[in-house]
Image (cartoon, rainbow, N blue to C red):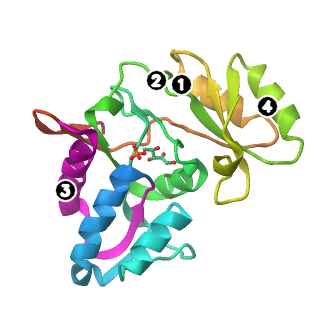
Amino acid sequence: MDESRLKEKAAVKAIPYVPKEGFVGIGTGSTVKFLIKLLVEESRKYSDVTFVPTSLETMYLLNSGGLRTSTEFHGSIAIDIDGADEIDPNGNLIKGGGAALTREKIVAANSQKLIIIADQSKLVNKLGKFKVPVEILPFLAEQTIQNIENKGCKVTLRPENKNRSDNGNIVIDSDFGLIDNVQDIQTKLKMIPGVVEVGIFHGMTWKTIVGKNSGVEEINYK
Ligand SMILES: O=C(CO)[C@H](O)[C@H](O)COP(=O)(O)O
């Protein structure tokens, strides 16, 4: 089955998890766009919900569909629904293919539950075939990239029209090969001055909803 059809199937299954009031985090990417489309179609049901968008694009799509957003509030986000680039059997993730990793991680970290929606191609036994996105400050960027490579990876630069995050920083991709200890890599990269965020999401996922040719599978972690 076509990959985008599988993404759509996952998004459909996520709809019952969206509460009718309070704060709901909404991720970024093509899978999440299917979710937003479904929310917009039923926007009246969500008139008491404030959505917390993880990118300007997501904010625009929600607002133009008549849904309320906020990025300035105090309180708890009940559910955050986002996509992923890779998902391992423990629900650890690589994210940031769309350069939204920093806002995505902030929203995920401040949510009670993170639900990932994806097509089956995102499930892997080990993370690392997809290069780990890293957001870095433009200040002394070349030096920061050298320090990232010194941790044992090869860095690839994105094309200039696609290498900036909504925060005005640079997003690069780091190839570590298949990663044995994701937490270790995440910590090592995060400790480098100039690194804003790392696209490894360790131990954050509550549930993954996967669109497969055979149906939709829900994988629970904790
Ligand atoms: O992390 C992300 C954006 O920064 C996306 O969630 C990830 O790239 C998956 O995207 P898609 O749903 O288009 O496959």
Q: Quadrant of residue 86?
A: top left
Q: Which mark is residue 127?
A: 2
Which of label 3 and label 1 is nearer to you? 3
Q: Are marks 2 and 1 in contact (CB under 8 Å)?
A: yes
Amino acid residing under circle 3: Val
- Please indicate whether residue 148 sits to the left or right of residue 158 in the image: right
Mark 4 or mark 2: whose residue is earlier in sequence = 2
Q: Which mark is residue 12?
A: 3
Q: Which mark is residue 182?
A: 1
C-alpha separation, residue under disc 1 versus residue under disc 4: 19 Å
Secondary structure under tag 4 reads helix
Amino acid residing under circle 2: Leu
Instruction: Determine whether 85 is above or below 39 in the image.
Output: above
Q: Is mark 3 within 8 Å of ligand 1?
A: no
Q: Nearer the viewer, residue 71 or 99?
A: 99
Amino acid residing under circle 4: Ile
On-image quarter of the N terminus:
top left
